Image (spheres, helix red, strand yellow):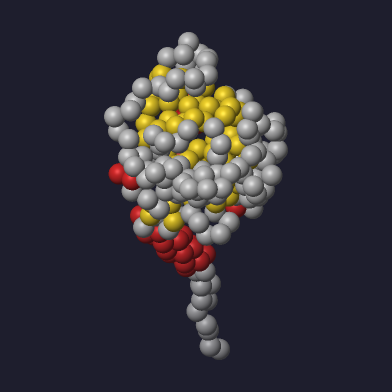
Amino acid sequence: MSTHRKQSPRRVRPRLRRIAAASVSTVITTVALLGAAGVIPLGGAGSAATRDLADTVVGVGAPQDPGTRSRGTDLGETSTPTGSSGTGTTSGRTTTGKAPAKTTSTTSTKLPTSSGTGKRVVFSKSAQRVWLVSSQGTPLSTYLVSGSVTNNLEPGKYHVYSRSRWAVGVDDSGVMQYFVRFAHGPQAAIGFHSIPTKLGKPLQKISQLGTPQSHGCIRQKLTDAERMWSFATTGTEVVVVA
């Protein structure tokens, strides 16, 4: 009578664990490589910023203004903003004509006369410069900006009515940060924001600030856009001078 040696069952679990571990390792390596290349943000503020940007793409809106869509172009916002009308003596009116002269003004840093009182933002079209003024009337900061190449904004008093941390161009016109809206153009909002970027590249040089470059809004260096964002909360007065 023949006998047979009892065979041990094949070990499947360890092999499955090795396969799973290898798969996880591959995924982690892929994510790390994509993160290093800038394709995928890895943790920290970058991830939160990316989520905010994704929200604006689908029209959810910006964190501080959930009722306002934050899609837009350098022309401003493509949808009618909600909230206050944002109108002052001339808000919502536009003119056509020649754009301001494309000259850089780096010496005229004095706050323009007849620019109002109290806390306010002052934008000079001719100087292509902004002033942030305290409630006591003291200029806290001033810097060069790039306004519109068209004469789409009349001098007058306006008020900040809407803000978006991110704004995405609907016509593939780039990505903007720290969008502070204060006026209504013919079909879009007008406001302050950072220099737009497209595929990671800025649409103008910082050295070009001080000359009109946009097609409606007012471009700022990123650090200045952050400064504006912190200063110009909803309701802040904006004074536009010639």
Is residue 183 shown left or right of residue 145? right
Q: Quadrant of residue 183?
A: top right
- 63 over 118 or under it: above or below: below
Q: Residue at x 60, y 49 (%)?
A: 71
Whether residue 137 appears in this view of the structure is yes
Is residue 183 shown left or right of residue 120? right
Q: Nearer the viewer, residue 126 or 73?
A: 126
Residue situated furthest top in the rendering: 136
Residue 135 horizontal/vertical position (percent):
50, 13
Q: Residue at x 42, y 48 (%)?
A: 213
Residue 170 horizontal/vertical position (percent):
58, 56
Is residue 75 shown left or right of residue 146? right
Residue 228 horizontal/vertical position (percent):
47, 30
* Number of dots carrying numbers: 0
Q: Residue at x 56, y 47 (%)?
A: 96
Whether residue 48 appears in this view of the structure is no
Q: Residue at x 44, y 20 (%)?
A: 113
Residue situated furthest bottom in the rendering: 1
- 82 over 60 or under it: above or below: above
Q: Quadrant of residue 100?
A: top left
Residue 74 horizontal/vertical position (percent):
51, 49
Q: Nearer the viewer, residue 110 or 226?
A: 110
- Which of the image's four quarters has the N terminus? bottom right
Residue situated furthest front in the rendering: 97
